[in-house]
Image (cartoon, rainbow, N blue to C red):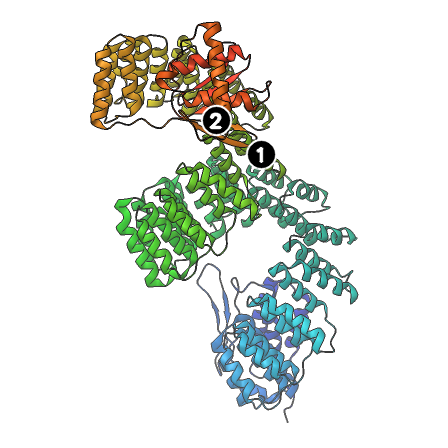
């Protein structure tokens, strides 16, 4: 028998003192006090010391203070202080000493329990093994109580194999033994072994079920957690407790099944947990994770005094579903707020793109005395990065440094990312180099910034540095580096990176595979991109879409459509990619057909879909179909989207419906630069130069800064309206007042302007003064002006330069021939036609089209295939006879035939109501004869005609045209 040894008065005093010291620092003092009183004969002091150590470990973070108790046999006490900055305290205590013989069985068991408890908190494998050996040597290993704690200690120290062997060797087991090894197996990720153990358990209690459910959830098997919860109902007599419901609700939150969420909520109410705050919080969190914010709201409103957790969950839930107004209202209603509350609303503003409000809320948090933490600074720095406000970022950096001398990895990542996104790469590098701790996000932020603002070579250098420093590369970093590689000169580097992904096995990652596809496409090697696609282990929607966009870039629409057709699943992004493939390669009609197919398959379009399809209608100048598509955008709530509205402005402008374009423009609440440029371009196309200048003045008044496209619209409008003085002013102001350098497009407008005004010498002088070589458009504009003003000498000069540029299109020859013809040099006309014949220059087939009854009717010269051809020719002959008799028109149709625009107008006259204007589109320039006929028709039938040819709009009314007979 073990006998108890007498306890000294000092030990009693120490015992009393242990109850009066609660704080971690006082507990540490108490340990030293106990140990200073220690004598080998006073064994109970060890128990007190161990208990005190355990309390310290419970109160103190393991990363700040580690306490290891050992006392060497026959040696005096040794207290060691760790030399690191954390000042860890190591107290060495060896429990293998003779005074055990003086303790009772219960006291020895209690001592072992305290020692194993302390070892569990410390996580020392060596101490755990020595404790196990001491337990065997004392003959107490048969104690089920100590055996269970031994299993728990080994499991928590990561020695699950040893724990499992002890379990197998044990002769006596109770339900706690089974539950302990079950938890250990689950903590180590051995889920299958745990399942087998669970099935073999002779007796299960609620802890067994909860342990298995929690283990499933910790190992990412949320659905198995829910299935086990259901099995508990079906196969056991136990009623789920608080922990079972909480675990099941977390699993439901993870999978996001709202139907299961409702059932779990109903069961919790049935079993009397409806008013339990823990369950109420779990229900709110579950509903929010399932995007059922209104169900969460109902539970929240039933709570008499919601906890901070409940308030914070509701704020997060509202912000998650983009209901920021309700999130802010909930935040304002909180009776008290903690740092989590502030962080939630600040992060919500930042994630929803409301970065200025995020910064404002941070200031408010500071004013109200709530101390920011790392999460706060990370969110605010993210806001600064996204609005490129490095001044705010520098201010935050200075504040952080004053408070925290050493940056933690979360704040450090935010600073590196903020400076990198603001283009301050050197500052980003300085912060990066001062960080004590870096993770993959740190490296990725720096690489992304250098990739955007630095050089490709520097990105590769960083990559090699990462390899040298043995940084564990993840898929995001590899995808980022692969994204930097572009251009034919970098194809070899791209191939090396691809080889590295294969060597490391990361090519099995779908994001890395997608980045590899994109890399090959950007380097121009589409066949290697295709080969890489076929060798990928798995594909997602992005993989297929990447291949579609790759072949779109190469102009191979057929291959792009092939990948689209092979897709097992498509989303709206895939459809948009294929729509873009058709429209970017001028297959407008095919794009619209695909949109109709998309509608039939009930794919919900987004704003990109509508912008693309409306743009296709603009190119084809079919306003009615475009209006129908715009109506669909309004129906799905995207009619007010500024990008959709901008495309509608362009549509109506290109169809000659400038009044409707203005209505769309006026309806935009927040106009951007594209909005202003679109409406100005519309007025310019329709020959309303003064209106362009008026809109430009309004644009400046609201503080919108122009760009080079703005001035193309202004100068084009001035050109079409003959506003020479105004054009000169704006051409000079563009560079002087706004620092915009003139491009070839601006010079084309100015040459066209001077040509229309008959200032051919001035136009030629401007061409000579250009800072770059004139292109074909500039010489073509001069040649067109020479035709109007019969200047054959300058026309020959323009044609000579066009031929030197290897530009030999049909229109240029016709313009030169017309210039000779108008000057009476018929022999030169014949020479031009002979040259055209010898060089094989062919005329582009001319066609005109008109929309009637939701159908587009296309006509060519001397058309005979239209079903109403007889009526069309009859109407045209009647109208030509009328203008011959009344206005002396000389009919030239016997020489040139009936051109397509005449036939289209005649069809409009017999098909559309008398009050409706007739809109006709043509792909080539209108000839003189047709232009004269159209003016006379508008006079005879008293009807507005709008004709768009290859150069401009002609608004014909009462016998006159908006072009002023200059086109």
Is residue 618 positioned above or below 460 on the image? Answer: above
Q: Residue visible at 29% across and 16% down?
A: 783
Q: Secondary structure at mark 1?
A: helix
Residue 43 showing in the rendered view:
no
Q: Residue visible at 65% across and 66% down?
A: 247
The reply, left or right, for residue 592 in relation to residue 950 is: right
Disc 1: CA contacts within 10 A as few (<14), some (14-19) or many (>=20):
few
Quarter that holds the C terminus: top left
Q: State the image coordinates of residue 819 (x, y, percent, origin top left).
A: 28, 12
Q: State the image coordinates of residue 120 (x, y, percent, origin top left).
A: 55, 73
Circle 2 residue? 869
Quarter that holds the N terminus: bottom right
Q: Secondary structure at mark 2?
A: helix
Please state which of residues 896 and 707 is positioned toward the viewer in this rendering. 896
Is residue 608 positioned above or below 909 on the image? Answer: below
Q: State the image coordinates of residue 596 (x, y, percent, origin top left).
A: 53, 42
Q: Residue visible at 52% across and 28% down?
A: 851
Q: Residue visible at 77% across and 52% down?
A: 305
Circle 1 residue? 628
Q: Where on the picture, by quarter, is residue 702? A: top right
Pick whichever of labels 2 and 1 is earlier in the sequence: 1
C-alpha gap between disc 2 and disc 1: 29 Å
Residue lying at the far bottom in this picture: please name it: 1
Please state which of residues 591 and 911 is positioned toward the viewer in this rendering. 911
Please state which of residues 356 and 668 is positioned toward the viewer in this rendering. 668
């Amino acid at each position: 028998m073990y006998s108890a040894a007498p306890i000294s008065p000092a030990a009693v005093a120490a015992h009393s003192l242990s109850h009066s010291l609660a704080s971690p620092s006082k507990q540490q003092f108490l340990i030293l006090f106990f140990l200073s009183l220690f004598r080998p004969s006073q064994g109970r002091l060890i128990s007190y010391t161990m208990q005190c150590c355990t309390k310290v470990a419970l109160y103190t973070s393991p990363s700040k203070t580690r306490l290891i108790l050992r006392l060497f046999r026959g040696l005096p006490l040794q207290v060691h202080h760790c030399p690191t900055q954390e000042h860890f305290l190591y107290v060495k205590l060896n429990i293998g000493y003779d005074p055990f013989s003086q303790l009772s069985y219960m006291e020895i068991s209690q001592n072992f329990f305290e020692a194993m408890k302390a070892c569990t908190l410390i996580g020392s494998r060596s101490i755990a093994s020595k404790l196990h050996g001491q337990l065997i040597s004392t003959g107490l290993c048969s104690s089920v109580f100590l055996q269970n704690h031994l299993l728990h200690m080994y499991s928590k120290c990561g020695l699950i194999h040893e724990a499992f062997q002890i379990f197998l060797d044990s002769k006596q087991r109770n339900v706690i033994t089974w539950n302990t090894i079950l938890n250990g197996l689950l903590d180590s990720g051995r889920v299958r072994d745990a399942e087998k153990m669970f099935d073999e358990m002779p007796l299960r209690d609620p802890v067994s079920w909860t342990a298995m459910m929690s283990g499933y959830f910790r190992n990412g098997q949320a659905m198995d957690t829910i299935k086990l919860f259901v099995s508990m109902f079906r196969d056991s007599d136990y009623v789920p407790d608080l922990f079972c419901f909480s675990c099941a609700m977390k699993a439901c939150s993870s999978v996001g099944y709202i139907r299961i969420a409702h059932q779990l909520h109903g069961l919790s109410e049935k079993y009397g947990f409806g008013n339990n705050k823990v369950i109420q919080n779990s229900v709110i969190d579950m509903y929010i994770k399932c995007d059922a914010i209104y169900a969460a709201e109902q539970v929240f409103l039933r709570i008499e005094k919601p906890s901070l957790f409940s308030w914070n969950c509701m704020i997060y839930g509202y912000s998650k579903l983009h209901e920021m107004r309700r999130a802010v209202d909930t935040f304002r209603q909180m009776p008290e707020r903690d740092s989590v509350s502030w962080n939630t609303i600040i992060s919500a503003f930042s994630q929803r793109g409301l970065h200025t409000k995020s910064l404002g809320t941070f200031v408010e948090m500071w004013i109200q005395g709530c101390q920011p933490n790392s999460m706060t600074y990370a969110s605010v720095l993210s806001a600064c990065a996204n609005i490129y406000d490095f001044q705010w970022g520098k201010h935050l950096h200075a504040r952080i440094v004053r408070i925290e001398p050493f940056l933690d990895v979360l704040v450090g990542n935010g600073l590196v990312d903020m400076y990198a996104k603001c283009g301050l790469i050197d500052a980003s590098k300085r912060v990066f180099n001062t960080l004590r701790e870096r993770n993959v996000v740190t490296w990725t932020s720096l690489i992304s910034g250098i990739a955007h603002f630095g050089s490709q070579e520097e990105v590769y250098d960083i990559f090699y540095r990462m390899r040298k420093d043995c940084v564990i590369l993840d898929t995001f970093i590899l995808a980022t580096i692969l994204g930097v590689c572009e251009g034919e000169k970098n194809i070899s580097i791209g191939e090396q990176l691809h080889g590295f992904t294969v060597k490391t096995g990361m090519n099995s990652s779908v994001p890395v595979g997608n980045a590899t596809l994109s890399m090959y496409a950007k380097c121009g090697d589409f066949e290697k991109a295709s080969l890489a696609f076929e060798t990928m282990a798995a594909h997602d929607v992005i993989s297929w879409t990447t291949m579609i966009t790759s072949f779109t870039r190469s102009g191979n629409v057929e291959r792009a459509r092939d990948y689209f057709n092979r897709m097992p699943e498509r989303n709206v992004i895939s459809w948009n990619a294929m729509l873009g493939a058709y429209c970017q390669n001028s297959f407008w009609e095919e794009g619209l057909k695909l949109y109709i197919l998309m509608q039939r398959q009930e794919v919900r379009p987004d704003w990109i879909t509508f912008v693309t399809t409306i743009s296709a209608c603009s190119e084809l100048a079919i306003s009615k179909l475009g209006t129908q598509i715009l109506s669909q955008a309004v129906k799905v709530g995207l009619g007010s989207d500024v990008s959709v509205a901008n495309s509608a402005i362009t549509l109506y402008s290109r169809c000659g419906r400038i009044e409707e374009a203005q209505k769309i423009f006026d309806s935009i609440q927040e106009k951007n630069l594209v909005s202003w440029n679109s409406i100005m371009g519309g007025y310019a196309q329709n020959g309303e130069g003064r209106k362009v200048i008026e809109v430009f003045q309004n644009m400046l008044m609201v503080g919108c800064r122009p760009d080079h496209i703005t001035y193309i619209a202004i100068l084009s409008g001035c050109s079409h309206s003959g506003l020479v003085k105004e054009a000169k002013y704006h051409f000079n102001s563009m560079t002087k007042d706004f620092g915009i350098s003139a491009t070839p497009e601006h010079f084309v407008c100015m040459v066209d302007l001077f040509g229309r005004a008959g200032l051919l010498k001035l136009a030629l002088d401007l061409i000579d003064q250009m800072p770059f070589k004139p292109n074909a458009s500039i010489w073509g504009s001069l040649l067109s002006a020479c035709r109007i003003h019969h200047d054959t000498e300058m026309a020959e000069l323009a044609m000579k330069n066009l031929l030197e540029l290897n530009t030999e299109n049909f229109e240029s020859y016709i313009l030169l021939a017309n210039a000779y013809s108008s000057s009476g040099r018929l022999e030169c006309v014949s020479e031009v036609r002979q040259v055209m014949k010898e060089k094989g220059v062919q005329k582009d087939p001319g066609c005109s089209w008109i929309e009637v009854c939701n159908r587009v009717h296309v006509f060519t010269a001397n058309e005979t295939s239209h079903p109403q051809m007889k009526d069309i020719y009859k109407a045209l002959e009647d109208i030509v006879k009328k203008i011959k008799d009344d206005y002396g028109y000389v009919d030239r149709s016997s020489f040139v035939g009936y051109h397509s625009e005449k036939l289209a107008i005649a069809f409009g006259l017999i098909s559309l109501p008398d009050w409706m204007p007739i809109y006709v589109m043509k792909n080539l320039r209108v000839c003189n004869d047709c232009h004269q006929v159209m003016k006379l028709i508008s006079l005879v039938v008293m009807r507005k005609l709008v004709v768009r040819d290859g150069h401009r709009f002609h608004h014909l009314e009462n016998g006159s045209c908006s072009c002023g007979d200059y086109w």
